[in-house]
Amino acid sequence: MEVDPAEQIEKAGTLITIEGLKKDDYDKAIVNFLALREDLQLLAASPKGDVYRNTSGNGAEIFLNGMKIATDEDFLFSYHIKEPNKKLQRSLNRENKNLPRDCYRENIITILKSNINNRTQTLIDELIDSRDQYDNGEWSFIDVKKLIGLNTNRNILWADSSSKNIEKLIYSLYGMDTKKYEILALNSLQYRSMENDDRLKKQTLMHVSEKLKQQRIEEEAEKIKVKEQKPRKRFEEEDLPIEDLNPIEREGWDWAMEKARELCGFIRGWEKLYEEYQFVLMEKNHKYVGLCYTDQKIIKLSRGILKDEYSLLNTLVHEICHATTNGRDGTKKFERGLTDAFHPLFKLGQSK
């Protein structure tokens, strides 16, 4: 074996010439050397390099063609570089036992690019789940984050950690969509890089929130459109046909509709209700004598009170107050509505 001094080859490092050994056998020997390490578990391999899980607890190790060239406490994985770039080659010399990261950073990114794909979910999951502990390691590289975004099978969203509206956006997102997202925070520079990348823009929080917001607007517009196209019932089209009423009941119904018209024309705030709401009959109900559906704009009166003008008028006023206040029984706004209607009702009664 012949060893040439590094200075004779323009500081490119130490050139070692091994005679009588095939390149394939040399590569196999290197693989076997790393395979014998009990604290290294191979996770992924490619012609560019291999990725190992290091269980020694002594920091990640960086190898070049089987030789250790650095230890990096901030890296999650250990790496075996097989095809060093020129920068790394120029950095090698006998005086430097532990190369700084700047020498091999691009080589690590190249290895991850050659290994991360949609079939390496274990590798991707470990990078995501360990991001807080190793935020100065692989997770600090935007290229690695983009690789993860393009290949992960998890529902992730990139968010700008410096945005003042991030909490509001996340809240609105979860209010609009039931899908469970993982919010991964980036600094502003990396977040803008994600937004400007057409492949990854759809994973940014702002883009997804705006998309869901627009979908919600379109859905509501479609509901309104369908509602407007649906023919509204006239007052004569009841749930319970008028023909089923006997003469006394029919007289009570006609009286109730006349009172409804009078009340809505006399009491402030009730003017449009008679035109907007449907008044319909329902069969005798032992629990309710009247019902108000504000979302459907329907007021129902029970057949059982058509013969009792006192109960009929009370029920009519009661349900109209539900409609005008949109309040439930016992609420302050419903009770206030009844109070506001009392004086006009008293004057209406005196004028009759």
Image: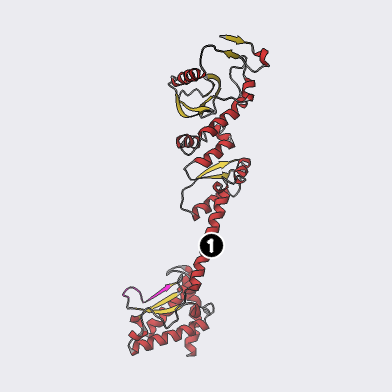
Badge 1 marks a residue whose secondary structure is helix
Residue 134 visible: no
Task: Measuring from the top left, give residue 43's x and y in whole percent.
Answer: 46, 30
Vertical relation: 350 (above or below) 225 = below
The number of discs equals 1
Q: Residue at x 42, y 73 (%)?
A: 292
What range is drawn magenta here?
285-292
Residue 115 horizontal side relative to residue 12, left or right: left
Residue 246 visible: yes
What sort of colour scheme is used for the picture?
A: secondary structure
Occupied quadrant, residue 13: top right
Vertical relation: 217 (above or below) 282 = above
Q: Which residue is mark 1?
A: 218
- In front here: 10 or 143? 10
Q: Residue at x 57, y 54 (%)?
A: 210
- In front here: 198 or 298? 198
Occupied quadrant, residue 109: top right
Vertical relation: 73 (above or below) 1 = below
Residue 36 horizontal side relative to residue 170, left or right: left
Task: Measuring from the top left, give residue 131's x and y in whole percent.
Answer: 52, 35
Task: Measuring from the top left, give residue 304's x and y in whole percent.
Answer: 33, 81
Q: In which quadrant will I find the N terminus?
A: top right
Mark 1 packing: few (<14 Cα in 10 Å), some, or many (20+)? few
Circle 1: residue type:
Glu
Which secondary structure class fits the magenta region best? loop
Task: Measuring from the top left, give residue 36's x and y in whole percent.
Answer: 43, 19
Q: Is residue 286 magenta?
A: yes
